Image: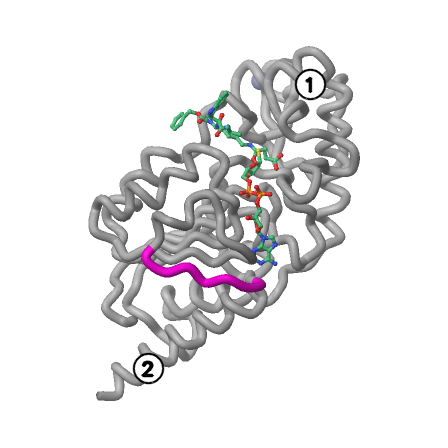
């Protein structure tokens, strides 16, 4: 396993599900009575900003009370090893891109997580794009401290461009191992990452509770709960590294 020089990890709602954060496309695709496909759009925010603010206020309260699980912590350990911040030092660059808007990767130790769909603990101005931390509720009356423009959640809705796509594409093309964890593969462009990485020569692995709509694109599919499969893979990866180092 140690031949990998650059690992790209993509995570989705399934990694935070064991922490108690609901996924999007479970049995009925509802989040506490809200339909994500209807509420997570710029049109919904135009038509009914109160509803959208309340949706994210509820989610923020929910997420604040949750804790990182064993899968987040295992990836945090991998991050520390890649930075030489612990006894396991690895000569592998790790890029972690999450579709999740929660902060459980950061709280689990992966400090440089890229949030392609935004962050629930940030808000921004619709006019000047001034981004600020947002720990409390937001509402229609909130105005930008920079230009008095309207405030919205710093979230990527359907039809909007995900963040950091230039850097993400660069990393996808140069990684030699692509890993997808806990995502259904139903939302583009994240659903296309595996094919890009594969086309550029990467080995590809999927970790999910069940086979997904895109499982056929992966070299290896690991079916099971991420709290078991991810720590297991990370510990084997680090152990393998140590053994190769000793030789
Ligand atoms: C476990 C587990 C355990 C559970 N162990 N596994 C037709 C019309 C209009 C638009 C489109 C269209 N066709 C395509 C589009 C594009 C559109 C899209 O893909 N729509 C589809 C729904 C059809 N995409 C966009 O609009 C995106 N923008 C875009 O494409 O811009 C163009 C562009 C591209 C490239 C460069 C520049 C420009 C934007 C997408 C924004 C997505 N936003 C959301 C909501 C905001 C965030 C939030 O509020 O939280 O992001 S939608 C929602 O889905 C959320 C998620 O990040 C995203 C992905 O969901 P995820 O993470 O995969 O969750 P689930 O619930 O689907 O799956 C969970 C998985 O976990 C399951 O597989 C379980 O089995 C597994 N699991 N527990 C292991 N314990
Ligand atoms: Zn502003």
The secondary structure type at the circle numbered 1 is loop
The way the protein has been coloured in the rendering is one colour
Residue 233's quadrant in the figure?
A: bottom left
The residue located at (59%, 26%) in the rendering is: 124
Asked if residue 119 is positioned above or below residue 14 in the image, the reply reads above
Q: Quadrant of the C terminus?
A: bottom left
Residue depicted at 43% across the width and 63% down the height: 79
Dot 1: within a 10 Å radius of its alpha carbon, few (fewer than 14), some, or many (20 or more) residues? some
**Percent of width and height locating residue 67:** 68, 59
Q: Nearer the viewer, mark 1 or mark 2?
A: 2
Mark 2 Cβ inside 8 Å of ligand 1: no
Q: Quadrant of ligand 2?
A: top right
Q: How many marks?
A: 2
Q: Is residue 132 magenta?
A: no
Relative image position of residue 52 (x, y in whole percent)? 71, 24
Q: Which residue sits at x=67%, y=24%?
A: 39
Q: Which residue is denoted by mark 1 in the rendering?
A: 143
Ligand 2 neighbours mark 1 (CB distance < 8 Å): no
Q: Which residues are magenta?
A: 219-225
Q: Who is closer to the viewer here, 140 or 242? A: 242
Distance between the alpha carbons at the discs numbered 1 and 2: 53 Å
Q: Is residue 98 above or below residue 235?
A: above
Where is the N terminus found, in terms of image quarters?
bottom left
Q: Which residue is mark 2?
A: 242
**Percent of width and height locating residue 173:** 25, 44
- Whether the magenta-drawn stretch holds residue 224 is answered as yes
**154, above or below 224, in the image:** above
Dot 2: element: helix
């Amino acid at each position: 396993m140690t031949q990998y020089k650059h690992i790209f990890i993509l995570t989705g709602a399934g990694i935070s599900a064991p922490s108690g954060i609901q996924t999007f496309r479970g049995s009925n695709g509802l989040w506490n009575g809200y339909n994500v496909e209807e509420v997570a759009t710029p049109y919904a925010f135009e038509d009914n900003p109160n509803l959208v603010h309340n949706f994210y206020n509820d989610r923020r309260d929910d997420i604040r009370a949750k804790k990182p699980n064993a899968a987040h912590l295992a990836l945090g350990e991998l991050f520390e090893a890649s930075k030489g911040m612990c006894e396991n030092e690895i000569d592998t660059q790790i890029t972690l891109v999450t579709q999740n808007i929660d902060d459980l990767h950061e709280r689990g130790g992966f400090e440089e997580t890229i949030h392609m769909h935004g962050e629930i603990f940030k808000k921004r101005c619709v006019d000047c794009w001034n981004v600020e931390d947002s720990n409390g509720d937001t509402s229609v009356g909130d105005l930008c401290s920079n230009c008095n423009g309207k405030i919205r959640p710093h979230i990527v809705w359907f039809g909007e461009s995900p963040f950091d796509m230039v850097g993400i594409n660069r990393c996808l093309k140069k990684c030699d191992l692509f890993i997808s964890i806990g995502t259904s593969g139903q939302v583009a462009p994240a659903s296309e990452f595996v094919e890009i990485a594969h086309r550029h020569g990467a080995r590809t692995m999927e970790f999910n509770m069940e086979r997904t709509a895109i499982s056929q694109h992966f070299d290896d599919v690991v079916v099971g709960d991420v709290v078991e499969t991810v720590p297991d893979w990370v510990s084997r990866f680090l152990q393998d590294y140590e053994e190769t180092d000793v030789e």
